[in-house]
Amino acid sequence: MILPFMRKILSVGLILLGCLTQTHAGMMPKDELDKLFEDQYLVGEIQADLPVYPLFVKDAASPDSKPELKAYVFETNEVVSVRGYSGKPINILVVIDLSGRFLSARLLDHKEPIFLDSYGTSKLTEFAAQYKGLTVRHSTEINKASDTPSRNEQSAYLRGVHRGTISAKAINRTIMSAAAKVALAKLKINVADHFDEKRAENESNNQNLNSDAKPVVAPVQTETKLADSSKPNTAAAPEEKIPVPDVTVKNLLASDASEKTSGKNTGKETEVKNSDQSEVAENTVAKDLGNDSLPAPQNISEKNEAINYLSEDQEARREWINLWQLRWLDIAILLGGLFILSLGLIAQKRFSANSARFRIVRSAYLLFTLGFIGWYAQGQLTIVNITAGLESLTSGGDLSFLMNDPMTVILWVFVGVTLLVWGRGSFCGWLCPFGALQELISLLANAIGIRQKRLRSALDAKLKWVKYGILVTLLASLYLAPRFAEQAVEIEPFKTAISFYFQRDWPYVLWAVACLMLGVVVYRGYCRYICPLGAALASVNFLQRWSWIPRREACGTPCQSCRHRCEYQAIAPTGKIDYSECFQCLDCVSIYQDDQRCLPLIQHRKAVGRVIPVASTLLPATLN
């Protein structure tokens, strides 16, 4: 048949699309920075050793005096590359003063697919703004979106972003690692050394607490916002009362200082002191704001120093392991649900033998999928998972970013395995929260007398091609028209209905409601005719190795019971099952065992009923 052949061609096309390359966003022009900071600072020229701009302030009382260096501004994309959920970096404009304190953290650009609309972007913008007032020495943790943020001199507990764990963690790593690199290069603040000292001090305090001696708490010099860099900071350093464990920043940066002689590492270690900060500030005061306003930058290599950053993979691994441990209960419940579903699909005949009981069990599982997997655990698989993965792989990344979403990872592994056994139906028929919502609404509609319309077979077959066209258009636009692709993924109403509980701008809500209402008119119309994720799963359905739905010789000729009752119209007149369009609802398996609906069983039951047994006591004596 041409349809399975075209699906194979489509799956090959998806692989070829991954060979295309992508562009990288450029740096913010200096004239834009001048406009942005015209009321606050004078923007100097970009530094030669690192793509950062110095920010100066002129003394209003002495217009002819030299401008005074106050801060640095930089785009994180130009300093580090930390991939977000989209597989692309999130660009933040960061302003950091000479003490290592964040004066501003402003979201410039992102490609996070769940947050591309104005509402979602505002959430990421609010998250990034929380870094104002923190320092490069702070350890940061991201809490739930419903938690109240808090901070002290050493630690900050930030309010997270609903449905944006991966994006929020990417922003955190981006800001902190970029700032650590700038602080070391321009301010001579070695964040790694700071956390080494803190850890050693905490261990010492813990040992003292475990001994009989009274613990000795050493004072810790804290940084304050630099109001006037011409005056020394004489504020008294507060005493540290409670040791704060190393949470994040230590894992973002590690230093390895070594001398180099004739290009060879001699192994002799050197140390970067925080006290060098004042020296750097003095050396970088401008004579004017021209190209020669700053002295030649003092590169780290000139002091025989080198920096080795922990890889993004190592930091990401530490984060997702912690997250999986925190969500152990959710993971256990999900695994339990998948185990029950697997048992039901393996023992499909017993599972569906009693049609009335089976309908109750199926409805209960759909409620579990919608309520727990979808709305609570946020485990809605989406075409965005595929597009983000493709973009990450084609831009030199990997799929490790998905590990921060354990529900998604577990579901994709389950779907990948069951594709080989049962096809796409294990997800589309049982584990898709939006699909479950459609089916439950259809059941409610049926209960009040509204029945779905069954389309003519020829029209149904043509409409099923629509979702493949949508999938190809969406995937091609990732590389040919990225801005269009950002909006095209909104063809899926999953984000609106499941991720954001319909709390979005009215066009998105209207589209989600329209998709649900389509399911009232035509059974699960969105899933069958529009869903690009369903098309993606169906396009690789040729990997399925078993025809698991039981069939008889009479199926199709003469029996058409299953075909006429299949709500998905996935059974051909010959009785053959189209597994790429089968949602694994098990209705046909239930019919197969029902002597009230299956024609061969009905005929057998009637034939047995016509045979009248004769008792031997009624026979003539001559026959006894």
Image: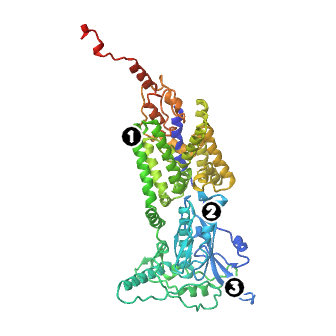
Q: State which tag comes first along the sequence, 2 or 3.
A: 2
* Disc 1 to disc 3, C-alpha distance: 79 Å
Q: Secondary structure at mark 1?
A: loop
Q: Nearer the viewer, mark 1 or mark 2?
A: 1
Q: CA distance from mark 1 to mark 2?
A: 53 Å
Between 31 and 259, which is closer to the camera in this rendering?
A: 31
| Extreme residue in the top direction | 622
What residue type is disc 1 on? Ala
Rendering coords of residue 305 (x, y %): 48, 79
Q: Is residue 259 in view from this perspective?
A: no
Q: Is residue 182 above or below residue 515?
A: below
Q: Is residue 43 above or below residue 212?
A: above
Q: Which residue is mark 2?
A: 25
Disc marking residue 347: 1
The answer to which of marks 1 and 3 sits earlier in the sequence is 3
What is the x, y in percent for residue 469? Answer: 60, 42
Circle 1 Cα neighbour tier, 10 Å, few/some/many (<14 / 14–19 / ≥20)? few
Q: Position of residue 355 (x, y in %)?
A: 46, 36
Q: Please give the residue where the numbered disc 3 appears in the rendered image.
A: 67
Q: Is residue 615 above or below residue 300?
A: above
Q: Is residue 460 visible?
A: yes
First reached walking from the N terminus: tag 1 or tag 2: 2
